[in-house]
């Protein structure tokens, strides 16, 4: 079974797989749930020397003032004896560093890339992995040293900025705080202890490290602190003796420095009885063991979050869509499949599976009848207009029994006004069908992946609807024109029976144009026109559904498909041009998902072995 710390390292790398700089912000819930060790200390507390002693290599930038200006996530991986040591940065994934002086320069350069060549700080972490047979599996986060005053070139807010950055890491309940304090200063003034007590008042998560023990004034010692008498923590204090500045200048070997450290504790009377748990080697082993214990206790929660994150990644990858096929056939198939999905969603809107299709029924059930009712036939059939049209229709020879031509003109002039509501109904349905195209386009997730194809499909659908509208308008208005062109025979057959009601044909033509006679004509015409309205109220929706709605369901993209078959591979490729950001995100998500699935299998193995 792989070491638990290495397993967590793998999950942490997955968490940061998206960021160019490895920001731990992509999935903060999972990242925050992973136990980690944050190294906290004031400036010149010996923090960097402790880290280098744990690693056994000189690799951290040195100098006066704030040297660590970005968090450094340091992952140590123990490899087989005899293997060559090397380091890798997350922002340079394919480059191995075997020269640790080059590692130091890269940390400095990467810091400058983010902050510029200034003394500013940045919360964006640098991720560094070191592989060596001389380390233990461990993950440490080196944070900028706490300071009390800003120096030249730094903003006045630098003190609070650093404190807030440190606090953002150590206040997380899964963070183990490695508090570094120099022994040659009063512990009551220790920046690391002060901020640790604020976020961890019971000391449950704090491990104390005392540096510079060998630099204490003569006659004083740190035995009370190391024994836990003067400042008690839940876990025993660890004392370390780092290389002096002279040793660093002389490039004293780390192995020799560790040997000298062991000798110091073993030979100093005040610390002789504590020597077995002092020194950087013991510190590294103790931290590794403690971190592994904490990780093991958190496995159920980590397991749950990893499973949840995998589901989220799979969902997002599904939303982003599959990678583009390389060959023309594959591209054509992809386009046709996406269009099929769009077409299916569009049909679902019309069929009521999705919302929107009901608005078309509203046109037929409310808008069209209301428009027909608003037609003012009474004005068209006023006494003056009836007398005028009938007289004109008779011409030089008055009608004998019934004013047939007058009836025809009155009916035609009334029915023709129905064209307006009929045309408006066609336009209203067309507008709704267009609205549903936009809805279906937005709801077809796959089209979001390909902006060019999205535009083409949308334009093609709208063009088809426009052609359907023209055909529908022609057919629908023909229905009205048919009613204008022909009066039913039954209607005329009734007229002779009603001659006496309208007047006596033996009377003068002028007598027969009296008001009573004209009102009878107007009433008869109105009755016929209302009958025509009732008929068209039913037939107009049928025409619109047949010419527009049914055709939209049957072949909205038929013309687009016929044109698609004429395109060459280059043109097909242009339709499937993705947003580069989407392509990059899919690749990163796929890589991260692979890491999570691997981690999931290993976590499950650990859980089952417990």
Image (cartoon, rainbow, N blue to C red):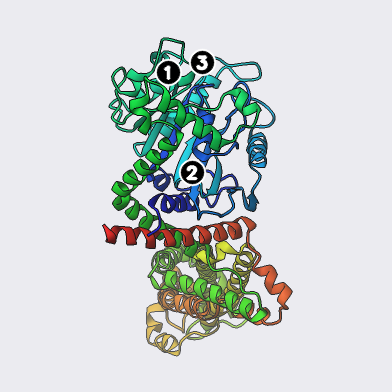
In this rendered view, identify the residue nearer to me: 136 or 155.
136
The earlier-in-sequence mark between 1 and 2 is: 2
Q: Quadrant of residue 334?
A: bottom right
- Label 3 vs label 2, nearer the camera: 3
- The disc label shown at residue 142, or none: none
Residue 309 picture location, percent across and down: 40, 55
Residue 442 in view of the camera: no
Q: Which residue is mark 1?
A: 190
The earlier-in-sequence mark between 3 and 1 is: 3
- Secondary element type, mark 2: loop
Residue at 59%, 71% in the rendered image: 461
Q: What is the C-alpha distance between the residues marked 3 and 2?
A: 28 Å
Residue 274 picture location, percent across and down: 34, 28
Q: What is the C-alpha distance between the residues marked 1 and 2?
A: 30 Å
Residue at 58%, 49% in the rendered image: 85
Q: Quadrant of the N terminus?
A: bottom left
| CB contact under 8 Å: marks 3 and 2 | no
In this rendered view, identify the residue nearer to me: 67 or 211.
211
Residue at 67%, 41% in the rendered image: 102
Q: Is residue 603 above or below residue 190?
A: below
- Secondary element type, mark 1: loop
Q: Which residue is mark 3?
A: 148
Residue 510 picture location, percent across and down: 52, 74
Q: Residue furthest left?
A: 610
| CB contact under 8 Å: marks 1 and 2 | no
Q: Is residue 84 above or below residue 190?
A: below
Residue 160 in view of the camera: yes
Residue at 60%, 23% in the rendered image: 245
In this rendered view, identify the residue nearer to me: 142 or 372.
142
Q: Which residue is mark 2?
A: 25
Mark 2 crowdedness (10 Å alpha carbons): few <14, some 14-19, many ≥20: some
Q: Is residue 406 above or below residue 576?
A: below
């Amino acid at each position: 079974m792989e070491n638990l710390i290495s397993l967590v390292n793998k999950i942490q790398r997955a968490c940061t797989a998206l960021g160019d700089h490895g920001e731990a912000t992509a999935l903060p819930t999972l990242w925050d749930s992973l136990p980690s060790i944050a190294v906290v200390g004031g400036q010149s507390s010996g923090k960097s020397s402790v880290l280098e002693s744990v690693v056994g290599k000189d690799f951290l930038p040195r100098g006066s003032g704030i040297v660590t200006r970005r968090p450094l996530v340091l992952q140590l991986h123990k490899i087989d004896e005899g293997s060559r040591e090397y380091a890798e940065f997350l922002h340079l994934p394919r480059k191995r560093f075997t020269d640790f002086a080059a590692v130091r320069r890269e940390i400095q350069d990467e810091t400058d890339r983010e902050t510029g060549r200034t003394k500013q700080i940045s919360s964006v972490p640098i991720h560094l992995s070191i592989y060596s047979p001389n380390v233990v599996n461990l993950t440490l986060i080196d944070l900028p040293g706490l300071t009390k005053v800003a120096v030249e070139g730094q903003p006045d807010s630098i003190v609070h900025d650093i404190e807030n950055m440190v606090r953002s890491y150590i206040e997380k309940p899964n963070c183990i705080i490695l508090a570094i304090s120099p022994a040659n200063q009063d512990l009551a003034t220790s920046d690391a202890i002060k901020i640790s007590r604020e976020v961890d008042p019971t000391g449950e998560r704090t491990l104390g490290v005392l540096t510079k023990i060998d630099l204490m004034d003569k006659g004083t010692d740190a035995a009370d602190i190391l024994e836990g008498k003067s400042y008690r923590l839940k876990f025993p204090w660890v004392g370390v003796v780092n290389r002096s500045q002279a040793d660093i200048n002389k490039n004293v070997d780390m192995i020799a420095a560790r040997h000298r450290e062991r000798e110091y504790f073993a030979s100093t009377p005040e610390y002789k009885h504590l020597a077995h748990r002092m020194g950087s080697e013991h510190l590294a082993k103790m931290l590794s063991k403690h971190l592994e214990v904490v990780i093991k206790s958190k496995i159920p929660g980590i397991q749950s979050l990893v499973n949840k994150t995998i589901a989220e990644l799979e969902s997002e990858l599904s939303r982003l869509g599959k990678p583009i096929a390389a060959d023309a056939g594959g591209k054509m198939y992809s386009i046709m499949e996406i269009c099929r999905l769009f077409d299916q969603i569009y049909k679902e809107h019309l069929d009521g599976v999705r919302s929107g299709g009901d608005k078309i029924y509203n046109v037929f059930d409310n808008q069209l009848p209301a428009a027909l009712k608003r037609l003012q036939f009474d004005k068209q059939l006023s006494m003056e207009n009836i007398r005028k049209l009938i007289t004109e229709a008779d011409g030089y020879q008055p009608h004998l029994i019934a004013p047939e031509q007058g009836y025809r003109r009155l009916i035609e002039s009334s029915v023709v006004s129905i064209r307006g509501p009929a045309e408006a109904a066609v336009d209203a349905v067309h507008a709704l069908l267009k609205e549903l195209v936009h809805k279906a386009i937005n709801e077809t997730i796959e089209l979001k992946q390909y902006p060019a194809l999205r535009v083409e499909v949308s334009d093609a659908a709208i063009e088809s609807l426009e052609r359907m509208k023209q055909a529908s308008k022609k057919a629908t208005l023909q229905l009205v024109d048919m009613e204008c062109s022909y009066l039913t025979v039954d209607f005329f057959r009734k007229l002779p029976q009603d001659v006496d009601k309208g007047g006596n044909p033996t009377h003068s033509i002028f007598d027969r144009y009296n008001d009573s006679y004209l009102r009878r004509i107007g009433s008869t015409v109105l009755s016929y026109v209302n009958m025509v309205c009732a008929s068209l109220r039913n037939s107009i929706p049928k025409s619109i559904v047949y010419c527009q709605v049914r055709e939209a369901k049957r072949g909205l993209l038929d013309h687009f498909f016929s044109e698609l078959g004429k395109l060459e591979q280059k043109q097909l490729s242009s339709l499937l041009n993705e947003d580069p950001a989407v392509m990059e995100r899919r690749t990163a998500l796929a890589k991260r998902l692979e890491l999570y699935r691997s981690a999931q299998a290993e976590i499950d193995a650990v859980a089952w072995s417990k």
